[in-house]
Image (cartoon, rainbow, N blue to C red):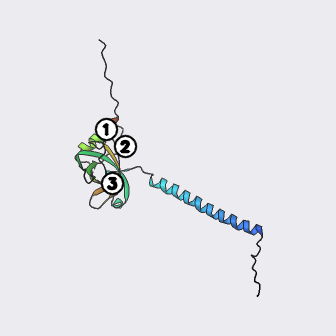
Amino acid sequence: MAEISWEKPSVPSAQLKSADRWKFLVGGVLLLGAVVYLIVSGTMSGAQFFMTVDELVNNADYVGKTVRLSGAVDGNTIAYDGENLILDFTIANIPTDTTDLALTLHTAVTDPNASRIQVHMENEVKPDLLRHEAQAILTGQFHADGVFYASELLLKCPSRYEEGVPQQIEAS
């Protein structure tokens, strides 16, 4: 019988280490590039905290795109279906520059000429802070039917945070 032997060709250790270094270097550069991309794209998408109802309604480019929207809740329009967890309400436009939020929210809701938009949310429990003249910050999509389909809702109610004056107790 013939004997067959096979030997692995010897590769100088210097070449092997150099190839391994290149693999780690390329992998590190790719990983660093991915991290930088995620940081930049996250920063750019959050550059504007929210837009107003006027900005959304007056620009057709936002139809079908995910945006963050702010407005004053009209408490008379709140409709909640607790069985199906469906929440519908209307928000009115509030200007971006304001010094007195409570007054601005009141003015927006009572102004019949303020732009308004219908909001629809599904699978949402009705929040306690959802009330008349609360500021709603919503994330979702504005559709061609004129309804804003929200996926996230944050509420700010200035009257809830007003500092109460303690009652004076008279000593008898």
**If the image is split into quadrants, where does the C terminus sit?**
top left
Return the disc, 3 or 2, that comes first in the chain's sequence: 2
Q: CA distance from mark 3 to mark 2?
A: 24 Å
Q: CA distance from mark 1 to mark 2?
A: 13 Å
In the depicted structure, whether residue 8 falls above or below residue 70: below
Comparing marks 3 and 1, which lies closer to the viewer? 3
The local crowd at label 3, few if under 14, some if 14 to 19, many if 20 or more residues have their Cα within 10 Å, is many
> Of the residues shown, which amino acid type is indicated by label 3?
Ala
Q: Quadrant of residue 99?
A: top left
The local crowd at label 2, few if under 14, some if 14 to 19, many if 20 or more residues have their Cα within 10 Å, is few
Q: Nearer the viewer, residue 54 or 7?
A: 7
Indicate the position of residue 48 as horizontal and vertical percent values: 42, 51
Q: Is residue 15 left or right of residue 146?
A: right
> Which residue appears at 31% of the width and 56% of the height?
149
Q: Nearer the viewer, residue 152 or 137?
A: 152
According to the picture, the residue beneath numbered tag 3 turns out to be 150
Indicate the position of residue 119 as horizontal and vertical percent values: 28, 53
According to the picture, the residue beneath numbered tag 2 turns out to be 97
Q: CA distance from mark 3 to mark 1?
A: 24 Å
Do the CB atoms of the residues marked 3 and 1 lie less than 8 Å apart?
no
Return the disc, 3 or 1, that comes first in the chain's sequence: 1
Indicate the position of residue 142 as horizontal and vertical percent values: 32, 58
According to the picture, the residue beneath numbered tag 1 turns out to be 102
Report helix, strand or loop for mark 3: strand
- The outermost residue toward the top is 172
Report helix, strand or loop for mark 2: loop
> Which residue appears at 27% of the width and 44% of the height?
108
Q: Nearer the viewer, residue 26 or 4?
A: 4
Return the disc, 1 or 2, that comes first in the chain's sequence: 2
> Which residue appears at 28% of the width and 57% of the height?
147
> Of the residues shown, which amino acid type is indicated by label 1?
Ala
